[in-house]
Image (tube, rainbow, N blue to C red):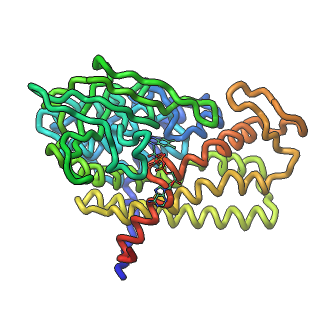
Amino acid sequence: MRSFAFEPFDLPPETERLRAEVRAFLAETIPHRTARERAESWMGLDPAFSRKMGERGWLGMTWPKKYGGHERSFAERYVVIEEMLAAGAPVSFHWIADRQSGPLLLRFGTEEQRQAILPRIARGEVCFCIGMSEPGAGSDLAGVRTRGHKVEGGWRVSGQKIWTSNAHVATTMIALVRTSEGERHTGLSQLLIDMTSPGVTVRPIENLTGAADFNEVFLDDVFVPESMLIGQDGNGWKQVNAELAYERSGPERYLSSIRIFQEFLRVIGPEPTEAERLFIGQVTAQMWTLRQMSLSVAGKLSRGEDPMADATIVKDLGTTLEQMLPPAIQALVPPDHLVFFEDINSGVTIGHGAPIADRDFNSTLAYLVQASPSFSLRGGTREILRGIIARELGLR
Ligand SMILES: Cc1cc2nc3c(=O)[nH]c(=O)nc-3n(C[C@H](O)[C@H](O)[C@H](O)COP(=O)(O)OP(=O)(O)OC[C@H]3O[C@@H](n4cnc5c(N)ncnc54)[C@H](O)[C@@H]3O)c2cc1C
């Protein structure tokens, strides 16, 4: 049986100065963001905020300067991301582009694509969405049916994508498309699709919390020029898998529920009960361990290694913690602090029972109780991740 090695990695002390800078920026830039808004974590959207981050040089941080990057270390990037998530900053507009589309283009894109696109990502001007999932192809991604027919100068693409986060605001989609028949895992390609192209229709899907941040995307005979192919025609499957390591290992995979933990600490005050103390200790230890594991994966990615399995373990353990937090806190907090039937968008209490003891706490908890079931679906489901881990261990 194979095993994994999460090599310990400590952030260099000099990153603490950057951490202080980021905290000062956040205190100045988003002082009035409510706890409920901060609970949206990396789904909070504000294009102006993304541009401000670009101005500070905090997007495309590790990329070469010739592509608009800043040639800073992955440890520095980690500190910025960690602070953004801890503060619940509205990072969604640039998130996917900075986290995975940019690195994908750096690795597989043409020189022309890198020069044209990466500086715009680093300035926070563009929003990317990921067009992988389809109605009949989620876990079974190799089953995508969106088809690109070869025509003079490019492809004509037709099909349907679903659950596409931010498609309604995105400038560009990186779509996984079948460009030739053959084996299931060959014949797939990644294409950059301009979301303003004729034939692209985006329809929002409302989720359990009432927000509509993912969508259905219909592609009807959309022309995609040859220059928009990423990497090699037919190599899409391998490229997507490389991309998923960026998607699965970051601190966003264990910090999505951090706001309710912060609110919990605030509400219980300086003298927690025995049960609360025990809970705080357990959660803190788990978070710290996940942070070390996530840092280890970030280190491997920065050295050009392919830590697919390690990243998968971080996501599986991380989302387990993120999903455990809201119901565990719900069970611990005295009932007179809670009203669970508050409509989280209007703030109106639609149930009956106790008065609202603490609106920030309640609305944050209500939001995360409803949002957290999706944490183990986005980016690959728990069952699929465990299948990958088993395969990497040589168990299947
Ligand atoms: C909030 C959110 C945002 C998302 N954003 C995007 C996005 O931006 N772009 C994008 O392309 N997709 C996105 N997705 C889609 C996501 O990647 C898929 O939902 C996910 O991969 C699961 O696919 P599915 O929904 O088709 O479920 P299915 O694949 O139909 O799975 C249904 C259930 O069956 C289980 N299952 C399936 N196959 C197996 C198997 N072989 N062994 C054991 N169990 C199995 C699954 O674990 C799951 O529990 C998003 C999803 C969510 C919830």
Q: Is residue 151 left or right of residue 327?
A: left
Q: Quadrant of the N terminus?
A: bottom left
Residue under the point 32% across and 61% down: 299
* Residue closer to the observer: 57 or 325: 325
Residue under the point 48% across and 42% down: 84
* Figure check: 252 above or below 275: above
Whole-percent x, y for residue 327 in the image: 71, 53
Whole-percent x, y for residue 252 in the image: 48, 49
Whole-percent x, y for residue 4 in the image: 37, 74
Q: Is residue 364 at all visible to an observer of this figure?
A: yes
Residue under the point 37% across and 34% down: 129
Residue that sits furthest to the top in the current view: 198
Q: Is residue 143 left or right of residue 188?
A: right
- The picture quadrant where one finds residue 32 is top right
Q: Is residue 16 at all visible to an observer of this figure?
A: no
Residue under the point 39% across and 77% down: 395
How many marks do you count on the picture? 0
Residue that sits furthest to the right in the current view: 353
Q: Quadrant of the C terminus?
A: bottom left
* Figure check: 375 above or below 194: below
Q: Is residue 236 left or right of residue 368?
A: left
Residue that sits furthest to the left in the current view: 152
* Residue closer to the observer: 318 or 16: 318
* Figure check: 315 above or below 339: below
Whole-percent x, y for residue 266 in the image: 72, 48
